[in-house]
Image (cartoon, rainbow, N blue to C red):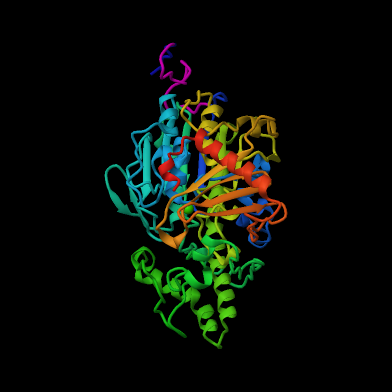
Amino acid sequence: MNHKISLGLALLPLVPATQTRGQEKQDSEHPNIIFIMSDDHAQQAMSIYGHPIGKIAPTPNIDRIGLEGAVFRNNYCCNSISGPSRAAILTGKHSHKNGFMKNWALGFDGSQQTLPKLLQQNGYETAVIGKWHLISKPTGFDHWMILNDQGDYCNPQFITESDTTVHKGYVTDLITKYCEEWMDNGRDKSKPFFLMMHHKAIHRNWVPAERHYHLYENVSFPLPDNYYDAYEGRYAAQLQKMNIYRDMYEGHDLKMVAGIDSDSLLFDPWPHAFMGTMTTEEQRRFLDAYRDRNNEFYSKPRSFKEVAEWKYQRYLQDYMGCVASVDESVGEILDYLKRTGLDKNTIVVYTTDQGFYLGEHGWFDKRFMYEESFGMPMVMRWPGHIKPGTQVTGLTQNIDFAPSFLDMCGISIPKDMQGVSFKELVEKGKTPADWRKSLYYHYYEFPGFHSVRAHYGVKMERYKLMHFYVDDKWELYDLKSDPEEMHNIYGKKGTEKITDRLKAELARLQKQYDVPENLCR
Ligand code: CA
């Protein structure tokens, strides 16, 4: 069957008249996009960014994307938490505009304009496989297969239009397999495709694949120098509950047991989502994998500090074990694309829904506008368009993803999208003079998990201003002299001018993005 092109139609098919269904097309005007997004992947844990952790536990496959394409050096989210980041990516809009401001919200309004819908309307085949976490059913996808809620590491449930079923295996491997199967047999090969491949890893509670149970067990990771931060001068930081040595669940997160040779995990509030999904035999192999290490922990008395640092090591060992499965998955997809010839005309993106703390300030989790969780590491490969080794240094944000992908696919960007296309930044490898100089951030989920106060803020190149508005507490950081954000200089002598400038910029951004006043108090 020949596809007809009728000029003048809004929904113009992209398929040439000679193209037949089932035949792979390589139309450079309309590249395929594989958007690989993991969950909670810290920049510190992606070796291309050069952090000491990445040197000990490298991610060679993720790095390949960046080495063959672009590394984003200043990419940020607009609201550092799962659902809201995903909603911002789908819509190109800040949380207050797309309506999904908190994880504990009503479902995402799937009737609104989204990136996959716009691509679909312009002749793309679209799919999402893996974590969704937006409560309502996906819309705008020709194919979807999503994890139930957060998803489980072992034998997870997948939801499709027709059912919810347990799938045997490790979640990262299953998602990889289903993405390849869809690219192989599930899609209309006469169309370009957009695939959202969303991993559950590296989300809490960090259960590595069985082949990685012992990968980092003898590795000692470098303790951040602010691990014992006392949060002086930082009101909201004093009130959070996301400290590794005070708040992390010893059974659920750290796999600690009741004593020598015990099979009884310490505190695990969600047993159904962890050991509960493993078979009895899998549970036994899992507990055995930790047995010697757990026995060693109880072999001698330990001080508070020794326990705090032991917990950090256990956290990092498991976290990086989960990163390993994601890196292998990326390698598998890159090999698949090469094997099938799709690599030449496919944009491959690897990113994560937001950054994460790996012990900085003593923390795990995200939410704060501090750099580790505000930042979103990202690499992108697009042969013929992005030169290998490109560094994107302009300020970019997750609301830019949708307009950028549309731009790269030759589709016009709707006026109501709040993000802007960074196509020129990646293609030319430099930031245009009129590119944005500031970013707006707004975290809403309070009360909520980890007790992080709601706040908004503005980041400019050197300075960051944050307002924990419910209690009217301000923070100001000079990121050049204080990159770890340990010294709140708000109200200090000599900062009056820069404070005024940042407050004016904040007000300008809130006006530009049309943030309702009732959400700012
Ligand atoms: Ca997340």
**Is residue 180 visible to the viewer in this orientation of the structure?**
no
- Type of secondary structure dominating the magenta stretch: loop
Give the camera-side residue of 61 and 340. 61
State the image coordinates of residue 341 (x, y, percent, origin top left). Answer: 57, 34
Q: Which residues are magenta?
A: 8-25
Q: Identify the residue at image location x=45%, y=54%.
A: 470
Query: Which residue is at 43% across, 11% downward?
Result: 8
Q: Vertical placement of 73 versus 217: above or below?
A: above
Which residue is at the front of the view, 195 or 428? 428
Q: Is residue 22 left or right of residue 498?
A: left
Seen in the picture, residue 221 relative to 408 is either above or below; the reply is below
Q: Quadrant of residue 504?
A: top right
Residue 96: x and y, percent? Answer: 42, 40
Residue depicted at 56% across the width and 39% down the height = 348
Instruction: Give the side of residue 312 with respect to residue 514, left or right.
Output: right
Quadrant of residue 312 within the rendered picture: bottom right
What percent of the width, then of the height, locates residue 252? Answer: 42, 69
Question: Is the N terminus in the top left, top right, bottom left or bottom right quadrant?
Answer: top left
Residue 243 visible in the picture: yes
Is 414 above or below relative to 289? above
Residue 6 lies left or right of residue 308; in this view the side is: left
Q: Position of residue 494 (x, y in %)?
A: 71, 51
Q: For the image shown, how many numbered marks are present on the structure?
A: 0
- Taking the magenta stretch, the answer to whether it contains residue 10 is yes
- Residue 69: image quadrant is top right
Extreme residue in the left direction: 162
36 falls in the magenta region: no
Relative to 117, is 475 on the left or the right?
right
